[in-house]
Amino acid sequence: MDKYLRPIWVLFKKELMAYFNSPIAYIFIGVFLVVGNWLFFSSFFLVGQASMRDYFSLLPWMFLFLAPAITMRLWAEERKAGTIEFLLTLPITDWQAVLAKFFGGLAFLAIALLLSASLPASISFLGNLDWGPVIGGYLGALFLGGSYLALGLFISSLTRNQIIAFVSGVAACFAFFVVGADFVLAGAPQAAAPAMQFIGLGSHFYSIAKGVIDTKDIFYYFSFIFIFLWLNVKIIENRAWK
């Protein structure tokens, strides 16, 4: 097991450091924190409740752009620069390469979330904050972000162009997020509504964000992430760019 995990750990550190070796990472995190805090506090004092429900309602939409921005370069840049052949000739498996890139992106997203922890800390001083939904919200955000990243990583492996990878990633994440939304289900065939609600990333996120940790939601997110990582591995195995 140690021999299998060591290459993943080495590549994981390389991918994570690659974000912070560029000013773009700091811009992403800065924009994420400033925009999130500004949108939240613009209505927080009007509502007059010590709650982060509105913040967690905003997170999926911010992640909708942040996650594809994180993943757009992971394979597309490697293919355009021609370094992907070198990477995949190293003594590693395709699964190890995919997992290292995925966990590198997830760690970056988790760092951005961790830096927003000052928000609930500040609110707790202003009122009696219920920490159950806060913990559930952050856990749900990690699962949702991981799902966006797995989907974006798969899309990045299909193209050499980072802009195409970003736009396609945003569109795909948006489609999977809203497919189970109430306004979509209202116009869907009644027989298809339960399946659409289950497929939708949003319905599972909001369930966890309420502080209700259901094994059904956890199983869904793990399955979603695994499926798109597996598809990513299949694309790598096919070596379609050669």
Image (tube, rainbow, N blue to C red):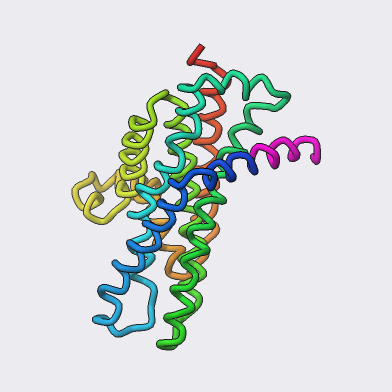
* Image spot of residue 23 (x, y percent): 46, 47
- Name, please, the residue furthest toward the left: 187
Vertically, is 225 above or below 240? below
Q: Residue at x 72, y 35 (%)?
A: 7
Residue 88: image quadrant is: top right
**Pick the front one: 102 or 72:** 72
**Quadrant including the N terminus:** top right
* Image spot of residue 16 (x, y percent): 58, 45
**Pick the front one: 210 or 153:** 153
Vertically, is 54 above or below 32? below
Q: Main secondary structure of the magenta part?
A: helix
The answer, for residue 103, to whether it is visible in the render is no
Vertically, is 86 above or below 144? above
* Image spot of residue 212 (x, y percent): 48, 68
Tell me if residue 227 is in the magenta stretch. Answer: no
Q: Which residue range is magenta in the image?
A: 1-11
Q: Residue at x 70, y 39 (%)?
A: 10
Q: Residue at x 34, y 30 (%)?
A: 164
Question: In this figure, what is the number of numbered marks?
Answer: 0
The answer, for residue 134, to whether it is visible in the render is yes
Q: Residue at x 62, y 24 (%)?
A: 87
* Image spot of residue 209 (x, y percent): 43, 66
Query: In the displayed structure, does residue 239 sit left or right of residue 127?
Result: right
Query: In the displayed structure, does residue 225 sit left or right of residue 27?
Result: right
- Name, please, the residue furthest toward the right: 2
